[in-house]
Image: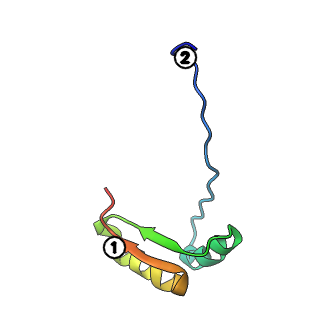
C-alpha cells in the first residue's frame, strides 16, 4: 500500500432549502427509520434548534447547542 492508496465511504445527504423546510424534518426522519433524534447546533442557532426539537415532539431527545 502506498501513501496514495485510500478508501472513502461517504454517507448520502439530502439538503432542502426552502421556506418551511423545518416542517419536513420529522417526516424525513421517519422515512429513514429513525425513532429519536438529538438536535445539534451552535449557541448562535440555539433558538432555531429548539424550534426544530419542539416540532419533532416525542421524537426529539433534546438540543445540544454547544457545537463548534
Q: Tell me residue 15's x, y (percent).
A: 59, 60
Q: Tell me residue 32's x, y (percent).
A: 68, 67
Q: Tell me residue 30's x, y (percent).
A: 67, 74
Q: Which residue is drawn at 39% across and 74% down?
A: 63
Is residue 52 visible in the rendered structure shown here?
A: no
Q: In this view, does 55 lie to the left or right of 41?
A: right
- Name the foreground residue: 19 vs 7: 7
Residue underneath mark 2 = 4
Is residue 29 visible in the rendered structure shown here?
A: yes
Q: In this view, does 67 lie to the left or right of 26?
A: left
Q: Is residue 47 left or right of residue 39?
A: left
Q: How far apart are marks 1 and 2 (CA)?
A: 41 Å
Task: Give the colouring mode of the picture.
Answer: rainbow
Q: Which residue is drawn at 60% across and 64% down?
A: 16
Quadrant housing residue 9: top right
Q: Residue at x 58, y 14 (%)?
A: 1
Q: Which of marks 1 and 2 is in front?
A: 2
Looking at marks 1 and 2 on the same chain, the residue that comes earlier in the sequence is marked by 2
Q: In this view, does 38 lie to the left or right of 43?
A: right
Residue farthest top in this picture: 2
Residue underneath mark 1 = 46
- Number of residues whose C-alpha sits closer than 10 Å to that of mark 1, classed few (under 14), some (14–19) or many (20 or more): some
Amino acid at each position: 500500500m502506498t501513501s496514495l492508496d485510500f478508501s472513502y465511504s461517504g454517507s448520502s445527504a439530502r439538503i432542502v432549502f426552502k421556506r418551511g423546510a423545518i416542517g419536513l424534518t420529522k417526516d424525513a426522519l421517519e422515512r429513514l427509520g429513525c425513532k429519536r433524534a438529538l438536535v445539534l447546533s451552535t449557541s448562535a442557532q440555539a433558538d432555531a434548534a429548539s424550534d426544530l426539537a419542539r416540532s419533532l415532539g416525542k421524537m426529539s431527545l433534546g438540543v445540544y447547542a454547544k457545537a463548534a
